[in-house]
Image (cartoon, rainbow, N blue to C red):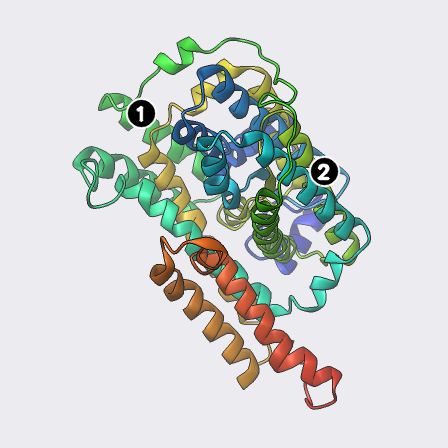
Amino acid sequence: MQTQENTQKISSDTPYLTVGLEDKLPAAKNFLYGLQHVFVSNVWLDPVFVAALIGLPLVLAANMVNAIFIAAGLVTLVQATRLVRLPVVQGPSAAFDSLMIAAGKANGLAAAGGGIILSGIIVFILAITGALGRLKAIFTPVVSGSVILIVGVALSSFTLYEFLGGTADMKTFATAPVLLMSIPTALIVILLSVFGKGFLRSYAFLIALVVGDLIAVGMGQTNFSMVADKGWFGLPHFLPYGSLEFNWTAFGTFFFAYIVAVIEAMGVYHAAAEMVNVPLDSKRIRYGFSGEAAGSIASTLIGGFPTTAYAQNVGLLRLTGVGSRYAVITAGVIFLVLGFVPKAGALLAVTPDAVVGGLFLPAAASLVFTGIGILGRMEKNEANFTIAGLSILLAIALPTYFKGYAGVVGEFLSNTILVGAVVAILLQLLLVNVPGWLGLSRKSGS
């Protein structure tokens, strides 16, 4: 339990947190805080989406979902206890969704596995040798703030899709049942996060989830048949898609996706460290990316795909005021239980997409504000204004013009996070770091 002295320290260092990074809580509270992280992460959405679009047989689809739960649980546990030691939840990276779908439709999941594992080994080596840690010098407040803001904007696209019931050409778009689930869910999170005290603020997401699900049940918008169809216990299969294969094309595309995930995760680490007021040193970065790479390899071997740090769960920290890594450890344990008990995992998927959108909307908004807060700490000069302005502008506007553009160029320029992060990093090097190394700049710009 945290002492009065600890509480006062938390309040002065991180004014929006009531529970600090190292605060241990009673088991019941830890469980509920961990459960909030599980629901906000929605780790099951990616494998369900990927398996459905590939058209995987039921056995392989169920194996993919179980594998993701187990990988998310293991990596989250190891990261929070031994490696990065931040309140960061791990889950499947959306950067790999389209690649997995394309590989699955072409009967190339074995080759995809080979590409993922080789990419993971390379990222692991870069991490453990400290090469990735050198990125810290580039991730100044202007870069990390811009990247986190852009991640929040990118997350909003998925969030609004769920919140509004799809797009304008779909029958469910902005229908009364959808909005009657999404709007009250979001409003409860917002009102409790802003005006709630103690219990009400800390459990804002769980309260909103319960209310949203009750509304859904009352309107007949839930389907429990999938729960009945699932077994009580299951183990993932080793190499379920056959022996690993390798080709250069698969490796190149998946390594490219790994770079996207690494850049996003670096931003998430910065945001989490900022939130709980601890330094993000090279050791945390080295251990964190090593853990992510090893977890991604393990996930692939049992039929999943790579994991990364989840930005939306960092948004949860600010809104609930709970920054304890022990809540995240509990979330990791819950993930493992869900992985080995398919029926329990299926129960989570009963929550309608509109309720999920209602939960995600405030989390994405909080992430945007976290980015703005970090940007407020940057040195006010023309170089930094240019870095922030151009990276955010291009990240938001450019991908619209390259949707559907074929090849690597299309993959790069249609990715909001990658465009913004690469522009920010290149401008940081061009306008600040290189001139500083050459003695052409009076200020570091950081």
Badge 1: few (under 14), some or many (20 or more) residues near its Cα, within 10 Å? some
Q: Where residue 309 sits: x, y (%)?
A: 60, 45
Q: Nearer the viewer, mark 2 or mark 1?
A: 2
For the residues labelled 2 and 1, the Cα–Cα distance comes to 40 Å
Residue 72 found in image quarter: top right
In depth, the one of 187 and 304 nearer the eye is: 304
Element class at badge 2: helix
Query: Relative to 284, is 356 above or below?
Result: above
**Can residue 225 be seen in this snapshot?**
yes
Give residue 112's position: percent from left, percent from top.
58, 36
> In the figure, is residue 226 to the left or right of 251?
left
**Residue type beneath disc 2:** Ala
Q: Is residue 207 left or right of residue 6?
A: left
In this orientation, which residue lies closer to the viewer: 10 or 294? 294
Q: Identify residue type, mark 1.
A: Leu
Query: Which mark identifies residue 298?
Result: none
Q: In the visual, does 370 lie left or right of 290? A: left
- State if disc 1 and disc 2 touch (CB < 8 Å): no
For the view shown, which residue lies furthest in the right direction?
129
Q: Which mark is residue 214?
A: 1
Residue at image position (52%, 42%) is 96
Residue at numbered disc 2: 294
Looking at the picture, how far across and down is residue 187, in whole percent? Answer: 32, 44
Seen in the picture, residue 443 relative to 378 is either above or below; the reply is below
Quadrant in the picture for the N terminus: top right
